[in-house]
């Protein structure tokens, strides 16, 4: 597969191409000139190559846009960068009354080749005035086209389409996309493909070529597209087929590339990050209802962010902004099944005729006749485990559930997996939370509603039944008073027994099992070295600035560990039960993640092929999955080397546990300052970390461990 470039780099390249092809192209914006290159580094290099046409302007969005209008009236091409899309409201007057009206206000059509770039969206913790999605406020202005950057469209094509209209355009760019890679070669992943549709390739259709069931269509622009793809992937695990449709142009709304997809679809959902009310999604729904009502299963569903000010705190921001979970919830709440259409019924606006009715039982009624219901069985989730822990029931006993809805969480030695309801009906829990369960075991049933009797009112007890004469009375006890929790003899003696012990939480039990196995089976040795990481930290800061990602020492260490695989293959090998050494074809680096509910070891399999920005993105993604209990078995499989993060403030040295199946675990503690003498007898300060390597002494000896740590130290000091 072609190595995909980052979305920000793709846009930067498109701007360079525009300036090379058009000698009358200008770039106006705040801090767009080098070396800054814009707040998100999108305009880097332009002022160096075209110094007379790239102007860093004063802080006045109104003034910048007004100057752009004047240049466009003179026949020039102008790209305006609004540092944060939230500030584009300050340019509303020149957009409404100068740029757009000038197209036809002077008695003849006047080309106004202006593109206003607006970084938008949340997810970065920038707070209420730097995280909004204001697209909806510009819908419906004559001669103003709205576009949105996506990972599925080439930015050069989008810019060309915007400028070819001869009318002002706005290009919205979700900030969360800048550091992400584009999708190329018509593939999103191993399962999902994409294609561009419509006469101008405006619509990108993400779909599973192998799927045969009627899909749910999710229309999602820009940065929401990836969230919709995540929701579609999870919905597929629950038995639903979902296709994601991503437009390059938001307005004027184009439904040409969608009409043939609507026939037979379960439903249509429009997902966008803006708040509800007067949205782009409403415009899409209105167009589909007017032009394609005979093809729709029902009204178009809209899902948006909460009607709130966007907070800075990450957990509060996630609660407000539209996420993949909200899209998935809306998908799973849509009914699924074949449709019989009656073309004789009028559409809502009278422009067409359609009435849709389900054939066959609905999901809620699709239950077997047998009163025992459908079993909720535990599948084999991890070939290395003989039993799992039923961590919790996700819905209460007796609740009504839909087919595919998660009802239980089962913990393996590596991950927490959600078990979906195999059918719709009433949940009966047969096994208590916290119990062990083996693969194939039945832990509950989904009962048909008819099989659950209505609760009966218990008969009133006769007066004489208020006491139990044949039960020995206790001092101080009476009807309805619980017996004391300690033996009678101790009560009589006036002493209380020690409270009973509490069991380890299931997650900690699994950690205990791994630690016990490691100590029992692996003859571990340990070597530590002090490494000067001053240069590594500086390198991480530079990489963070260039990539726009949260690069730190962790990512630099992971990259160095991955790069040492070829020189030290024994440290990445594994020992089989038969005593054979199996070398690793490539380094798959595990990273410890403490989610508060347990310690997880997700794996970065392609660490050697990722740059630091990609590594940072991968680490953040795995951490977020762990925090949200979304890690899967595939996220944990195939580890060949563990990087154990023990970087709590003040921790200077830690000895990691080697997980079974792995030969080495490297501990990365907190970084601290140290004053040393240099070669000339002077004093200097440096940043150091005491890196510790735990290794299986059956495969690695002390000399190899020392050589490895020396090589790692040299790499970090470079």
Image (tube, grey):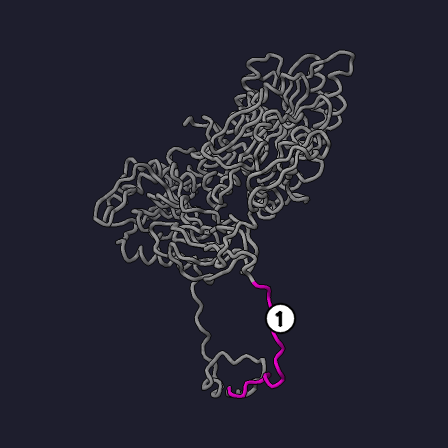
Question: Magenta span covers which residues?
Answer: 453-470
Secondary structure that dominates the magenta span: loop
- For image coordinates 40% across by 51% down, the residue present is 379
Q: Position of residue 389 (x, y in %)?
A: 42, 58
For the residue pair 196 and 346, the one nearer the viewer reads as 346
Task: Identify the image quadrant of the N terminus.
Answer: top left
Picture mark count? 1
Quadrant occupied by the C terminus: top left
Q: Can the viewer see residue 87? A: no
Q: Position of residue 254 (x, y in %)?
A: 63, 25
Whole-percent x, y for residue 577 in the image? 24, 50
Residue 262 visible to the viewer:
yes
Q: Residue at x 75, y 27 (%)?
A: 93
Q: Is residue 315 magenta?
A: no
Quadrant of residue 70 in the image? top right
Q: Secondary structure at mark 1?
A: loop
Q: Is residue 469 magenta?
A: yes
Residue placed farthest to the left in the image?
579
- Foreground of the two, 547 or 245: 245
User: Residue beneath label 1, please?
Assistant: 457
Q: Quick one: label 1, few (<14), some, or many (20+) residues within 10 Å?
A: few
Judged left or right of residue 367, residue 98 is right
Identify the residue shown where x is 45% and y is 26%.
185
Is 114 placed left or right of 636 in the picture? right
As drawn, 23 above or below 703: above
Displayed quadrant of residue 350: top right
Q: Residue at x 47, y 34 (%)?
A: 208
């Amino acid at each position: 597969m072609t190595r995909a470039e980052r979305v920000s780099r793709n846009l930067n390249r498109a701007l360079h191409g525009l300036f090379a092809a058009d000698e009358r192209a200008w770039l106006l914006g705040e801090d767009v000139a080098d070396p800054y290159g814009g707040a998100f580094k999108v305009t880097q290099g332009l002022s160096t190559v075209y110094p007379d046409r790239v102007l860093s302007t004063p802080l006045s969005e109104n003034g910048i846009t007004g100057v752009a209008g004047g240049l466009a009236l003179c026949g020039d091409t102008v790209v305006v960068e609004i540092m944060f899309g939230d500030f584009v409201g300050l340019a509303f007057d020149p957009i409404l009354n100068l740029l757009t009206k000038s197209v036809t206000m002077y008695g003849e059509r006047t080309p106004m080749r202006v593109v206003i770039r607006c970084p938008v969206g949340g997810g970065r913790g920038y707070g209420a005035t730097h995280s909004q999605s204001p697209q909806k406020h510009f819908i419906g202005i004559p001669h103003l086209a709205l576009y949105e950057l996506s990972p599925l469209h080439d930015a050069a094509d989008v810019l060309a389409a915007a400028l070819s209209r001869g009318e002002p355009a706005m290009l919205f760019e979700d900030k969360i996309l800048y550091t992400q890679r584009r999708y190329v070669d018509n593939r999103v992943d191993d399962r999902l493909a994409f294609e561009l549709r419509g006469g101008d390739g405006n619509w990108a259709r993400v779909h599973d070529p192998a799927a045969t069931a009627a899909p749910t269509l999710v229309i999602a622009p820009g940065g929401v597209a990836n969230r919709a793809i995540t929701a579609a992937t999870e919905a597929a695990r629950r038995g639903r087929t979902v296709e994601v449709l991503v437009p390059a142009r938001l307005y004027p709304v184009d439904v040409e590339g969608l009409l043939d997809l609507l026939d037979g679809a379960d439903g249509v959902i429009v997902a966008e990050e803006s708040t509800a009310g007067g949205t782009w999604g409403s415009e899409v729904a209105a167009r589909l209802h007017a032009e394609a009502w005979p093809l729709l299963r029902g009204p178009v569903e809209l899902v948006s962010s909460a009607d709130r000010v966007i907070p800075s705190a990450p957990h509060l921001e996630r609660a407000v902004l539209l996420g993949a979970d909200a899209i998935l919830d809306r998908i799973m709440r849509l009914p699924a099944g074949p449709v019989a259409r009656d073309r004789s019924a009028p559409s809502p606006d009278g422009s067409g005729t359609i009435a849709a009715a389900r054939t066959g039982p609905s999901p809620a009624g699709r239950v077997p006749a047998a009163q025992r219901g459908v079993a909720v069985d535990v599948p084999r989730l991890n070939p290395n485990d003989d039993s799992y822990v039923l961590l919790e029931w996700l819905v209460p006993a007796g609740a009504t559930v839909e087919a595919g809805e998660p009802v239980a969480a089962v913990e393996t030695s590596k991950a927490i997996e959600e078990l979906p309801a195999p059918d719709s009906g009433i949940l009966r829990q047969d096994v208590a939370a916290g119990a062990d369960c083996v693969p194939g075991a039945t832990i509950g049933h989904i009962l048909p509603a008819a099989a659950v009797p209505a609760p009966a009112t218990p008969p009133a007890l006769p007066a004489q039944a208020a006491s139990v004469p044949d039960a020995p009375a206790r001092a101080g006890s009476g009807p309805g008073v619980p017996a004391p929790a300690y033996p009678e003899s101790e009560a009589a003696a006036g002493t209380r027994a020690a409270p009973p012990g509490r069991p380890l939480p299931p997650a900690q039990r699994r950690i205990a099992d791994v630690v016990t196995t490691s100590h029992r089976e692996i003859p571990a040795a340990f070597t530590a070295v002090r490494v000067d990481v001053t240069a590594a930290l500086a390198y991480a800061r530079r990489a963070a600035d260039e990539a726009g990602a949260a690069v730190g020492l962790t990512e630099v260490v992971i990259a160095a560990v991955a790069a040492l695989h070829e020189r030290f293959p024994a440290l990445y090998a594994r020992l089989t039960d038969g005593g054979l050494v199996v070398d690793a074809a490539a380094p798959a680096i595990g990273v410890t993640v403490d989610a508060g509910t347990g310690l997880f070891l997700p794996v970065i399999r392609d660490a050697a092929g990722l740059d630091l920005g990609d590594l940072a993105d991968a680490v953040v993604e795995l951490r977020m999955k762990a925090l949200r209990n979304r890690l899967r078995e595939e996220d944990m499989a195939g580890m060949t080397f563990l990087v154990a993060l023990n970087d709590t403030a003040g921790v200077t040295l830690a000895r990691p546990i080697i997980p079974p199946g792995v030969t080495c675990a490297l501990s990365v503690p907190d970084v601290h300052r140290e004053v040393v003498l240099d070669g000339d007898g002077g004093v200097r300060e440096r940043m150091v970390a005491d890196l510790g390597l735990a290794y299986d002494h059956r495969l690695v000896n002390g000399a190899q461990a020392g050589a490895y740590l020396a090589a790692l130290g040299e790499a970090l000091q470079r």
